[in-house]
């Protein structure tokens, strides 16, 4: 029998009416003869609300208790969805991440799925039930404590379960129609992509395209599970994320990210070990560093700039100041008003010239580039935050994404 894993995001289950709509869609799929596992997110903004509540109660909430709290959000949804499905006369059982056998590392708030023992899910399917699984959560088999997978983690739950159950594909239901050539809120002429490769999607998601959690794309790629990103509000086809795509355009899409800040350490002695002594404590503190630029050294000193998530900038600054002091650097400065724009396309592997076109377009708009980083299929520039809308629109138009065909 065909088996599909469907994931419903927060806006798709935001209230009772939408939960009934989700139930109807699940039931339709089931009645068409397919086994269904539905992974659900917390309703609407409820994860944010729980985080706000925690911040009101405690200055520094204990990570274990924070995970206890946050996992409640998805439990609410799973039970409601199961009830609504049962009302259609279809048997449904809800399972927490732990009950569904989602085993993770012990890192609260950022746990990684290490294994899925999906016996209870399979038993439910064998009995002809729809199985509803709470997204975003698992259990650390060592401590037996519940864990969460990081924001957007229900996507990872869904794709990982799809792979563990050898599902045909994974459907991600969301509040947009699919993956676009750029964020349609910023570029109204952006168009929906029919397909995008895992490789490109991984770059786009990591560069700020919010539609899929990067780790879910990694699972998809590793286990070759096609992911169909589609709207929960209508039936049209969305975007297929898969191994091979028909075309390999030089530029598939543009992503942007204004959730990072830049930190510069000035006049760092240009000697072996200084970069290590700067970045080791940041890594130990769980701070993910994105772009790093080390400038040309002059008279034995150099400047090192890097970006970190805005939410972590204060911690990062404190760490960097300690190191700067210890290695006798000139000082530390922070810029919170930056943004990053990234251009992604598989065709960059074989066709050169995209970087220079990108830089020319930005320069034509008087936009200064502060940092550059590249991968074989991506070019990213850090620019001033107040120019990001102009930059994304100009690149979308100038790199030919504004036209008719977008693959
Ligand atoms: N509810 C969690 C969040 O808001 C997980 C998810 O929705 O994927 O991040
Ligand atoms: Mg999401």
Image: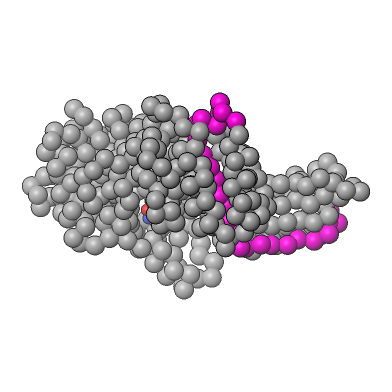
Q: Position of residue 44 (x, y in %)?
A: 32, 61
In the displayed orientation, state which residue is furthest to the right: 299
Decide: is 14 above or below 125: below
Q: What residue sits 39% from the left and 67% below the top?
A: 49
Q: Which is nearer the eye, 76 or 246?
A: 246
In the displayed orientation, state which residue is furthest to the bottom: 56
Could you tell me how many numbered marks the image carries? 0
Task: Classify the position of the C terminus by image quarter.
Answer: top left
Q: What residue sits 54% from the left and 66% below the top?
A: 60
Q: Quadrant of residue 191?
A: top left
Q: Is residue 323 magenta?
A: no
In this rendering, would 246 be left or right of 5? right
Q: Position of residue 23 (x, y in %)?
A: 18, 50
Q: Which is nearer the eye, 361 or 333?
A: 361
Which quadrant of the frame does ligand 1 lie within?
bottom left
Q: What residue sits 44% from the left and 33% below the top?
A: 198
Q: Position of residue 231 (x, y in %)?
A: 28, 48
User: Which stretch appears magenta?
Assistant: 326-352
Q: What residue sits 34% from the left and 37% below the top?
A: 194
Res 36 seen here: yes
Q: Is residue 327 magenta?
A: yes
Q: Which is nearer the eye, 63 or 169?
A: 169
Res 308 seen here: no
In this rendering, would 145 be left or right of 263? left
């Amino acid at each position: 029998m065909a088996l599909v894993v469907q994931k419903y995001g927060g806006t798709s289950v935001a209230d009772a009416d939408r939960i009934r709509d989700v139930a109807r869609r699940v039931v339709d799929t089931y009645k068409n003869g397919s086994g269904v596992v539905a992974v659900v997110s917390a309703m609407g903004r409820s994860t944010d609300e729980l985080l706000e509540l925690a911040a009101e109660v405690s200055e520094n909430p204990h990570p274990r208790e924070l995970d206890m709290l946050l996992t409640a959000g998805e439990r609410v949804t799973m039970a409601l969805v199961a009830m609504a499905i049962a009302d259609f006369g279809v048997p449904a059982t809800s399972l927490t991440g732990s009950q569904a056998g989602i085993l993770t590392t012990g890192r609260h708030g950022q746990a990684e799925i290490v294994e899925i023992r999906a016996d209870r899910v399979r038993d439910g399917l064998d009995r002809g039930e729809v199985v509803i699984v709470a997204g975003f959560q698992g259990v650390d088999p060592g401590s037996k404590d519940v864990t969460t997978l990081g924001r957007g983690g229900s996507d990872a739950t869904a794709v990982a379960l799809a792979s563990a159950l050898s599902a045909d594909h994974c459907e991600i239901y969301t509040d947009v129609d699919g993956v676009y050539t750029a964020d349609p809120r910023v570029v109204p002429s952006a168009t929906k992509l029919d397909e995008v490769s895992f490789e490109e999607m991984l770059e786009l998601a990591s560069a700020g395209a919010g539609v899929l959690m990067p780790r879910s794309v990694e699972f998809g790629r590793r286990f070759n599970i096609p992911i169909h990103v589609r709207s929960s509000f209508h039936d049209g086809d969305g975007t297929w994320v898969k191994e091979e795509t028909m075309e390999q355009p030089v530029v598939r899409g543009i992503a942007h990210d204004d959730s990072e800040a830049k930190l510069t350490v000035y006049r760092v002695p240009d000697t072996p070990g200084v970069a290590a002594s700067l970045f080791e404590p940041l890594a130990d503190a769980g701070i993910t560093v994105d772009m790093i630029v080390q400038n040309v050294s002059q008279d034995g000193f150099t400047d090192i700039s890097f970006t970190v998530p805005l939410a972590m900038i204060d911690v990062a600054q404190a760490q960097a100041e300690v190191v700067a002091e210890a290695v006798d650097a000139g000082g530390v400065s922070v810029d919170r008003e930056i943004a990053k724009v990234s251009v992604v396309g598989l065709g960059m592997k074989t066709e050169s010239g995209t970087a220079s076109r990108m830089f020319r377009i930005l320069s034509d708009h008087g936009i200064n580039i502060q940092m550059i980083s590249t991968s074989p299929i991506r070019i990213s520039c850090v620019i001033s935050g107040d120019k990001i809308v102009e930059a994304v629109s100009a690149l979308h138009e100038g790199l030919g994404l504004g036209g008719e065909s977008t693959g």
